[in-house]
Structures are given as C-alpha cells and as structure tokens.
Image (cartoon, rainbow, N blue to C red):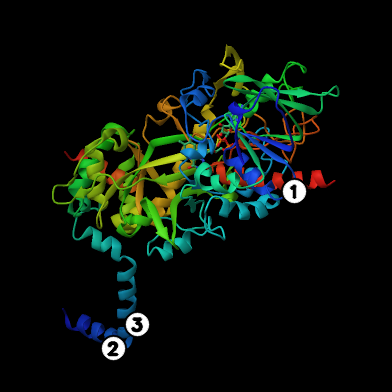
Amino acid sequence: MFIDGRALPAGTALEADIAIVGAGAAGITLARALKDSGLSVALIESGGLEWSEEAQDLAAGELGPQTYATPDTVRLRYFGGTTGHWGGWCRELDAIDFEPRDFVPLSGWPLKKAEIDPWYAKAQSVLQLGSPQRYADSEGIAKAAGAALPVARGGDIEPILFEFSPPTRMGEVYRAELEQSAVKTYLNTTLVDLRVGDDTRTVTTLTLARDGGPALAMTARHVVLATGALSNAQMLLAADSQVQGGLGNGADQVGRYFTDHPILIGYAAILALDPSAGGPFAFGDIAADKRRWRLAFQPSEAYRAAQKRLSCLITIEPPGPRFDPAAGAFDRSDAKWFGAPETVNALAAANATGPVRLHVLNAGIETRPNPDSRVTLTGKRDRFGMRRLKVDWRLSDADLEHYLLNLGDFAKALAHSGTALLRIPPDAAARWPEETSWGHHNLGTTRMGDDPRTSVCDRDGRVHGMANLWVAGSSLWTTPGAANPTLTIVALALRLADRLKAEMAA
Amino acid sequence: MSDPVARAWAVTRRTFGATLLGALGLAAVETWPRWAFWRGAASSLDALAGLPQAAALKALGRQAQAAMAIPAGYADTLAARLGDEGYAGAVARDRAEGRLVSIDGWLVPETQALAGLWLASAG
Ligand SMILES: Cc1cc2nc3c(=O)[nH]c(=O)nc-3n(C[C@H](O)[C@H](O)[C@H](O)COP(=O)(O)OP(=O)(O)OC[C@H]3O[C@@H](n4cnc5c(N)ncnc54)[C@H](O)[C@@H]3O)c2cc1C
C-alpha cells in the first residue's frame, strides 16, 4: 500500500512493528522479505515514485579537499533509491575480505563469508542474476563464450567474473508487489529525528517531516535505517537532542571509516599480442549462458594473504588503437594512455605475431580503513531543519602502492602467458589521488564489529548499545574489499530480515 | 685426405657411425637456437642485426636510451644470454621468469630492451 505522507492530516498517529527508513536496495529488500511475516511493516521514503529536485535537494552536502561526487550526485532520493541509476555490476566479496589481516589495521568483520553465503544465494534472484553463482567460473564462462583467457585461473593474478544485473531498478521492478502488499510505504516522508525513551537505549518515536504539513510521529518496535551509507551516519549523528553526539556514537565512531572504491582509469594499459585473447570475452561484456558477464583480474586470495596485499579488480577495456604492420605504426596514438608513439610502435613491431591492439586498463581498488576519512554534520540546514553533511574522503599513498604492486605482478603474468605487455605510466603516482574516479559506492560510516570502541553496529547490524535500532546497507562495511557492494547489501538485508523475524518471534 | 687418415675415418665411421651421427644430431638440436640465431655472424651481438625485427628493436632501443638507465656491462650480459639461448630463447626466458624492465612504463622482456640498446648504440 502506498501512502503519500504529504496527504496525511496533522497529528495522524503512525505505528508499525518494524519501521524501515529508506526505500533503496536495502530497504525494499527488507520490506519484501518481511511483507508476508504477519508483522506490520512501514517503509518510509523521503522521495516520491518519480525523481524530483525537491527531494534530491535533501541529499545535498559538502565535500572535503579530495575530489569526489557531491553528496547529491552520488545517490538518489526517490522510491528505489540509487538503484535508479546503478550499473548492475555484481560480485560477492571474497572470504579473505572478512578476515582480520595483520597488514590492514582494524580489519576483520565480525562475520565470516560462509555465514553470509546462504543469503548471497538468495540475493541472486533479487537482483535478477543467474543461479547458482558463477563468479569464480571464468574458465567455464570463457569456454561457453568460445574464447580464451589471457592468464589462467589459479595464478597469482587470476581471472574472475562480474555478473551484470539487468540492472534491477528496485523502484520499478518491485513497485507493484509492494503496492499490493500489506507493507505501508510512506512516500515523500523524511525521517529527521529519532527519539529515545528514558533508558536512551530504545528508539520510541520517529519524527517524519513532509512538505505541506507539520511533522508526524511514528512509533515502532524496531527501526531499521536503510537510507544509504551517508545518510545512515547523518541520521545517527543528528539524533543528538537527547544523547550527546548522537545515537550509537558513545565512542565517536559514527561517520568514520568512510570510503569508496577509487576507480583508476587508465593508470595502466596493455598491448595485446594474442588474437585469441582479444575476442569479445576478454575485453568487454560477454554473453554466455543467457547472462551478461565481465572478466576482471584480481590477485588471488592466497596471493593477497602471502604478499600482504590489498585487493583490486582490473578490467581490460574494449580494444583501442590497431597496429598496422605495413606502416609499422598504430592507426592512432594517444600518449596519455599509451606513452610515446615511437615506443609503442616499436614494441608492437618487435613482438607482433598476429593482430595487435592497445587497451586501457581500469581498476577498482581496496583502501585501508581510515578513521579520519569521515562523514560529519555541518551548520547548514535543509528545509526540514536537518543538518547537512560533509563528506571528507581521505586516501593514502599506501592504497595506490598496493595497486601498483599488483599491476607489476599482472604484467609478469601476461608476459609469462605471452598474450600481452603491460604499461604502468611513469606518472601514475603523480596522478594520485587527484586523478582518481570512484565507484559511487558509499562504504563504512557505521561499521560492524564486536568492539564498540572501534565500530558502530554488531554482527547483525544492531547499533551497539541500542535495543531496537538497526542499520542496513553498505555503511556496515568493516573493510571495503574490491567488489561492488549492492549484492552484499541485498544479502545482508535478507539476513537481517530473518534476524528481525526471530527477534519478533522471541 | 691422406690414406692413413682416410682409413681411420672409414674405420671410425663403420665402427661408431650410427652413435656418432646420433650424438652430433643431439648436439645440433641442443644448440639449435644459438646456431640458428648466429647464422654465420661473427658474434652473438652481431647476429642481432640479422633478426627480422631488428629495425623495430633498434627503434625501441632509441627510446630505451632516453627512458632507462643503461645498465653497466649490459653488452656482456646480452652476449652471454644470446650465446646461450639465442634471442628468442632469452626473451622467452625473461617472460617465464618475469625479468621485465620499464621503457616509458612498458614492462618489456629485459633481453628485448638490451638488444634494442645494443642495436641503437651501433648508430
Ligand atoms: C552511478 C552509480 C552507479 C552504480 N553502480 C553500481 C554497480 O554497478 N554495482 C553496485 O554494486 N553498486 C553500484 N552503485 C551503488 C548502488 O547504487 C548502491 O550500493 C545501492 O543503491 C545502495 O543501496 P541502499 O539501499 O543502501 O541506498 P540507496 O539505494 O541510496 O537507498 C536509500 C534510500 O533512502 C532514502 N532516504 C535517504 N534519507 C532518508 C530519510 N532521511 N528519510 C527517508 N528516506 C530517506 C533515499 O531516498 C533512498 O531511496 C552505483 C551507484 C551509482 C550512483
């Protein structure tokens, strides 16, 4: 059932067993998983069914010195949330991503991957992906696509897969289902405060602002913040009228450890020598098994552990300049990506055994947890009086260093297989971090952990010290891994739904 | 050929012919990359000029001269590698062992870069 919050009479008392705030990937997944549970579920969404400037303005905020997407461009405020324009790249985190690693300070989720696997399997269908998961099956998919892999699986740097979701626009795909369900979806209704009882451990009331009328109050037995990683922190910090510093922030951890995946575009290139590896499989989207895939290269889990390396996912972009053996030169040159034309022409002529192409490499990389990389509140307020946020993303040289080491190893693997030569531009370090793009993956800010001194939520997503306040979404990330987050967001939301059902049954 | 020598050769051929030819054949196979590479050149380094990709290597060497520190004694290293394995064999070994050097950021089998330097140094 859809209810426009703006149309509700002043003073309307709202209540629910479970109030889910935010109808994006996490919130819609939770609501769907709970809709037939017999519990009364409210889904509260700041925007409407269509995107609007008024709603999007509520997402605005400031940035620190690091170039980054402004807070109102890195996410969307309407029903369906940021899945309204996500790219659909899906991949699970690796088992090692959850482990404590002595070379990554403050690493180690309070969960093991195996504990999430059952929900990963269920998340596949939510995002309209194939089942079973075939993220490791680069060889099988290559075979099905009739193509070769430039390096073999099982090596130090190995081929892995992304699977593409169509991409699932949650607000479109699940709209009718939710509209016809018992879930009460309040549109154009914005959470601006969380009020707690005398114990300061229990959220008693949600204060919901809307245009055209005074704020409404909702009571709920459990509250789940699913407003995205930036707003989840913003909400906890802003709920400071009764608890100094905000909810769950006794150890000053809320908003910290914010990161995204730096996307390094063209920090490397390859000269592809083996035509069999230059087919559609290796260098772009591939269709196999009635699904869409993308090959990427990653240091294997064993290699990362042995070499004490952060992760990265390197993609080979579609073919660029083509070598003309008669002319002894490529059909075009682009020194920014491929260096001096004289060098690359000579290299191609010296090594060619067949067609030669140049390709740019892109990569999404893992960063180290950094408590100073954070989301804070500013003094500026939006039209509902909510303090706007500031995103101060900090990157360290060590993050790049690991990527360059991984690239060097990839160069060796490619040379070994005889399929390509790799280039790391001599100015790669000078480009960092200014020439860094990002995945639009807001991560961290309410990280999971067993220790409340270094985390905000427990292994289930419950805010430390709070009885009935939960968090869903990628603000829970303890360490970012390299994989895009939405599949894991959905898996953890499904897991939380089961957890809440158990909690309510008890 | 004098008679005694001719006689000795005939006896040797009769007695050890098959084995000897086999052994020579094996030696030829083992040293084949080197022989094929040298192709009558006075030294392994001189033979580089006879490679089909010599012009490309020389062009690469010119870039390498500007882009990388030229290793001391590189010609000896190169000559030894070429002498052992020939150009293709040495480059293949570089690839297999991850022995790569950077020219303008391109990670190139070391022997290829050294061969380029040598050819470029000849003007
Ligand atoms: C351009 C782009 C491309 C992307 N591509 C990929 C990709 O290929 N693969 C991938 O895995 N991820 C991708 N992502 C990231 C992906 O979109 C997010 O991980 C995912 O949408 C996050 O889900 P969420 O539910 O936590 O937050 P969101 O989807 O952002 O949903 C949060 C919801 O909460 C609502 N809300 C916020 N504040 C309030 C409030 N105070 N009261 C009520 N409601 C509120 C918002 O309106 C929104 O509907 C991409 C993102 C962008 C921007």
Earlier in the chain: of badge 3 and badge 2, it is 2
> Is disc 2 placed on a helix, strand or loop?
helix
Mark 3 or 2: the one toward you: 3
**As shown in the figure, which amino acid type bears the numbered disc 1?**
Gly
Q: Quadrant of residue B108?
A: top left
The answer, for residue A431, to whether it is visible in the render is: yes
Position of residue B65 relative to residue A213, above or below, is below
Distance in Å between CA atoms under marks 3 and 2: 10 Å
Position of residue A281 relative to residue B107, above or below, is below
> Is disc 3 placed on a helix, strand or loop?
helix
Disc 1: CA contacts within 10 A as few (<14), some (14-19) or many (>=20): few
Kindly identify which residue carries mark 1. A38
Asked if badge 3 and badge 2 are on a common chain, one would say yes
- Residue B62 x %, y %: 22, 37
A506 to the left or right of A13? right
Kindly identify which residue carries mark 2. B14
Most extreme residue toward the top is A379
Q: Between residue A51 and residue A167, name the one nearer to us.
A: A51
**As shown in the figure, which amino acid type bears the numbered disc 3?**
Thr
Q: How many marks?
A: 3
Disc 3: CA contacts within 10 A as few (<14), some (14-19) or many (>=20): few
Kindly identify which residue carries mark 3. B19
Q: Between residue A328 and residue A442, name the one nearer to us.
A: A442
